[in-house]
Amino acid sequence: MKDEPFESLDRPADRETLSAAFRNWAAEWTNARILERFQELPEDILNVKVWRLAARATKTFGAVAEIITKAGEGTAALEDCLDRISEAFGGSESDFVEVEEQLNILGSFILTASTREEARAYLAASEITDDREIENLRDRVALMINEANSDPNEKVNREFGYAWDRFRREYRAYFVGCHNKVMNSPERKAKLSETLKSEDWAEFDILSKLPGFDRRFAAIASKYRLELADLECTIDPGPLLEHQPYCNCRFSLSESAQAELLPAALNDNLRSGLASFRRVLSENGEELARSIEKFIESSNDADLEAAGRSVAAALRSGREVPRFDDLQLKLLVEVLSETSETPIKRGKASGRVSSATQTPPHIRETIKTTLPGDQILLNV
């Protein structure tokens, strides 16, 4: 519109040319909705520069948009329209050109505003990876967001769009690859199944319910089993990663390495818990042996008596208590009872978490508190 002649309106052709220019500008202005879209933006993403650009555009183009539209439609005099335009821009064509350029800058800011906020939120919620290229792209996107806010223009918008699309594409591929490796892993399921069918688990499951067994080992075993059960996902995370940097399941990049170690951690916890309980039994070996012998005196079961004598001998020997067979486990469950009146104190070592040489690091990290020494009560 700035190139049209504003002075020579004597000839009908010139008037029609100007009317057409006004109509074209009005159509473009209506379609662009620059000022309306600016008002729709959340205030927290705006800055002083764009506020000033919007304010000047409102006082100039915003003030004359209506009469330009009417002039193009023929419902307002072209001369009146030209006078209003001249007044709005102080009679300066250079000011007109300057504001028109500022309007383009404002349009550039508005054009990618919602995408920039989407990218900012995505970056904030996304996890750090160990892929250098992805992290470089993350930094690039953050930089371009700042540039598009402070110095919006078409070039910055293009560079931002390229970096943002590439980061999201690379991050999505990385996340999906890690997710699919960890979630629904046949190898992990096989390891868990093997553990739950093992003699260690059968013994742990029974003994962990008895007095004197450090309850923290049972709590940790339950925690690990729940975490392993959570490593199941029926969702394809790919489409979700278009708009959010995570799956709707519990998978986390930061915890994926730990997830791989969960089956081994569960096994270590089982062994540590059983070793801790055997130390408790050994420290109270004589008292427990007498209680077992008293219990089997009234038994008419030869096998139970033999099992009792074997356990009593092992307890008195001072050597490591061996694995219990089914009958021996049954005997211990019968003898160890919370209702007994004969206490056996747990020693210092078993009253606390195992020492650094006995307890794997991941278990020491899981156990944060120290329980006081408790008592084993014998059913005699």
Image (spheres, rainbow, N blue to C red):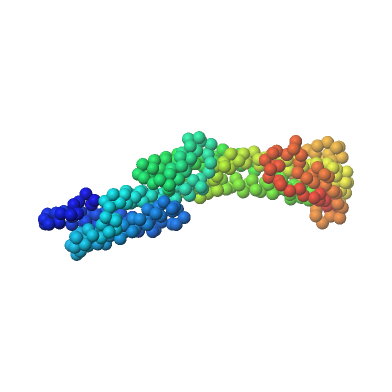
Of residues 223 and 342, the one drawn nearer to the viewer in this rendering:
223
Res. 325 image quadrant: top right
Of residues 267 and 141, the one drawn nearer to the viewer in this rendering:
141
Q: Where's residue 262, x and y in %?
A: 62, 41
Of residues 323 and 237, the one drawn nearer to the viewer in this rendering:
237
Return the residue found at the far bottom. Answer: 75
Q: Where's residue 23, x and y in %?
A: 21, 56
Q: Please indicate, yes or no, whether residue 333 appears anywhere in the rendered image.
A: no
- Is 194 situated left or right of 244 in this image? right
Return the residue found at the far front. Answer: 91
Q: Where's residue 308, x and y in %?
A: 83, 44
Res. 349 image quadrant: top right
- Is 238 situated left or right of 339 in this image? left
- Relative vertical location of residue 377 with respect to residue 174 in this rendering, above or below: below
Res. 329 image quadrant: top right
Q: Residue at x 19, y 54 (%)?
A: 6
Q: Please indicate, yes or no, whether residue 99 appears anywhere in the rendered image.
A: yes
Q: Where's residue 233, x and y in %?
A: 52, 47
Q: Residue at x 64, y 45 (%)?
A: 224
Q: Residue at x 81, y 49 (%)?
A: 373
Q: Residue at x 84, y 55 (%)?
A: 340
**Badge count:** 0
